[in-house]
Image (tube, grey):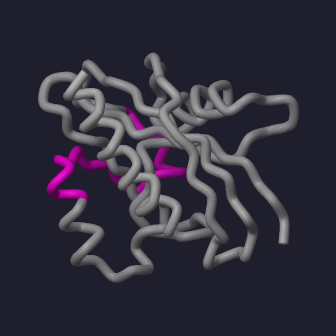
Amino acid sequence: MKILHAAKVFLRKRSDGKILVSTRAENKKILPGCFEFSAGGMLEINENPKEAVLREMQEELNLQCNVEHFDFVDYVSRVTGDYIILHLYVGELEQDNISFNKDEIKEIVFYSLDEINALIKNQDENKFDMGYIQAFAKLQKFLEKEKRA
């Protein structure tokens, strides 16, 4: 079992708070066609988590925005068996139209928190990676705290 570090970001629209959810391209080796974070990936050598998430946003979504670290999730991948530590970020988007990399992403959709909860509840469990489900629960707690502050 390898221990891997990844950085993932949930991007939300400033106008309505909906979260960008991407669907992985069908040609991906791991979890093709599955729902995914807005953007993210494994850390490269000598790269910190924030650098990684900013690089992945550029590679996958052709965009840059400010991001804030809010938590971690660790889990064992059901696909690879690796132990993965996810560094979680949140960022805000001004725009709705995003030109994404079709080699990485099949489609993107903006969902409300309730719609994402319904997707998780109603979809085949193989449509979401376990790390996503745990991270989404932490995102909801973070947003609730932010609302109260």
Residue 15 pos. (x, y %): 14, 24
Span highlighted in magenta in the image: 99-116
Nearer to the camera, 20 or 84: 84
Along the horizontal axis of the image, is 114 left or right of 41? left
Tell me the quarter of the image containing the N terminus.
bottom right
Nearer to the camera, 115 or 141: 141
Total of numbered circles in the picture? 0
Seen in the picture, residue 15 relative to 133 is either above or below; the reply is above
Residue at coordinates 59% horizontally, 64% vertically from top-left?
28
Occupied quadrant, residue 58: top right
Residue at coordinates 39% horizontally, 80% vertically from top-left?
125
Seen in the picture, residue 123 relative to 105 is either above or below; the reply is below
Seen in the picture, residue 54 relative to 121 is either above or below; the reply is above
Residue at coordinates 81% horizontally, 59% vertically from top-left?
3
Q: Is residue 29 visible?
A: no
Occupied quadrant, residue 143: top left
Along the horizontal axis of the image, is 49 left or right of 104? right
Nearer to the camera, 55 or 138: 138
Residue 90 pos. (x, y %): 42, 32
- Is 78 colored magenta in this rendering? no
Q: Is residue 81 visible?
A: yes
Residue at coordinates 47% horizontally, 38% vertically from top-left?
9
Occupied quadrant, residue 54: top right
Residue 129 pos. (x, y %): 49, 68
- Is 113 colored magenta in this rendering? yes
Residue 111 pos. (x, y %): 20, 49
Along the horizontal axis of the image, is 20 left or right of 35? left
Tell me the quarter of the image containing the C terminus.
top left
